[in-house]
Every structure is written in C-alpha cells, then in structure tokens.
Amino acid sequence: MSGHSHYATIKRQKETKDAARGQRFSKLAKAISIAVKTGGGANPDTNYKLRVAIDKAKAANMPKVNTERAISKGTKGTLEEIKYEGFGPGGIAVILEVATDNRNRTAQEIKGLFERGGGSLAGPGAVSFNFVSKGLLVVKKKKDTEAQILELIDLGVEDIDEVEDGLEVYVEGSKLNETKKAFEEEGLKVISSELVQKPKTIQTVSDEKTAAKALAFLNNLEDYEDVQKVFANLDIPEEVMKKLK
C-alpha cells in the first residue's frame, strides 16, 4: 500500500538500527533452541525452522559456539514455546511468540505489559484468524524494479510489496529456504529471510498520539527477554510516520 508503513516494515528497519548497537544473542539462541524442539530435530538440513534461525544468528555474527550450545539446549527440551494474542492501542491485533522456562512467570509479565501499554491480553484464537503463516524475504531492489518484480513472479512467489529498503516477498513458510537459494542463484541479493505471521487485514492508525502509543507498546513487547517475535496488523500513514520519526 503506497504511502503507508506496515508494522513488519517498521520493525525490520528498527532491528537494522538496533543491530548496529549489538544484537541480543540470548534471543537468537532461544529461537534456535525452540526450532530444534518444535521444528523436527537438530539437523538444519531437514528442519527448515532451525535453518532460518541459524541463518539469522549468522547474520548477526553470533559466535558458532553459542549456536552449538543453543542446539544442545533445544535437544534437552528446557524451553517451552507459547503464543499470546491480544489487542493494543488503536485496536491493533497482536500475536507474540514467546520462549520461556517458566510459563507462570512469563504469563503474568506479558499480561502486565499489555495492561500498562494500553492494550488487553486475549484468549487463543482471538486474533490469529486474521494472520497467516508465511516466509518473508526482503530483496534488494534493482534499478528496473518493474522488471525485477516480474522476474520474482516467474520464480513462483505469492505476493510482493515494494517498500523503501527493498522488496518484501512472501512465500509458503516451508519453501523459505529453497526460495532464498533460488533467488541467490539468480543473482538476487537477499537482505533477510524469516518466518512471519502476515495479517490478512490491517488496522490503520492515523492519529499521531495513538500511533506513537501503539509503537511504544509494541517496542516494549519486543524488548521483553522472553518474547521472540511480535506480529501486529498496525498500519501508519507515511505523513504520520514522518512526524513520529
């Protein structure tokens, strides 16, 4: 949608800036451990979730020993993956993916984060119907963007959004790694790749104060140590986003 900023794009741009100040390896390690436990074992060749998690850790320059430790921890099953759903300022729908070794503690702290941020925690299924699991690749744009989009379509992608820092390309989650490899073989520069929850419909927040409150709320969720990923259907018009920056 031209002239608008979806939360997935806003979050990625923030993460790029945060990476310059140092990635938090603990979250990346938890993602690897959870992938081992839930994705089908410790072999990244057969566990695509683990391959995605390892690739993300490599992109952040996480030491190999940390990755190996995280894989070992995953085989022991010490972490539990939990999803939380709820609503934030402006009526935005939110999904959290959490990794914890203490379900009760985490549940209380997540509930507090929602309430203090002006949101409300909801039950399973409250908002997940509005999201679909996808693989997301961000591809560097070429000078002839229109020709590049046609090239990507020929490679069998499902959806493409042009944004400021690249092309957001959506595929089936299970095809994320093979699609990334195919892109690279075609000479395309893949900036990032990850598994996401893509909103089917978006919630546009045009009021500047509400938009600022929604972003602060989502940032606080992102910063909580047990939270692995935050997904929201927030959409902010560019003219509002420029004021917030």
Image (cartoon, grey):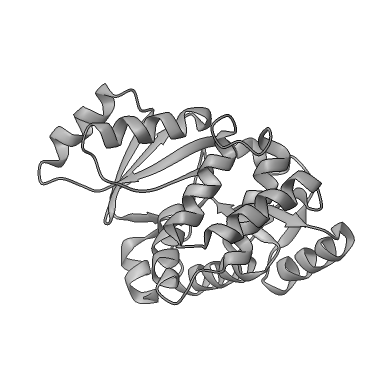
Q: Residue at x 66, y 36 (%)?
A: 39
Q: Residue at x 42, y 56 (%)?
A: 59
Above or below: residue 57 compared with residue 114: above
Q: Position of residue 41 (x, y in %)?
A: 68, 35
| Residue 198 visible at all | no
Q: Position of residue 86 (x, y in %)?
A: 70, 54
| Residue 46 visible at all | yes
Left or right of 245? Residue 30 is: right
Q: Residue at x 86, y 60 (%)?
A: 102
Left or right of 171? Residue 111 is: right
Q: Nearer the viewer, residue 51 or 202?
A: 51
Which residue is farthest left?
A: 144
Which residue is farthest right?
A: 104
Left or right of 11? Residue 159 is: left
Above or below: residue 229 compared with residue 119: above
Above or below: residue 69 compared with residue 24: above
Q: Residue at x 51, y 43 (%)?
A: 52
Q: Position of residue 67 (x, y in %)?
A: 59, 55
How many marks are shown on the rendered structure? 0
Q: Position of residue 114 (x, y in %)?
A: 72, 66
Above or below: residue 17 compared with residue 143: below
Q: Nearer the viewer, residue 68 or 205?
A: 68
The quadrant of the image that shows the C terminus is bottom left
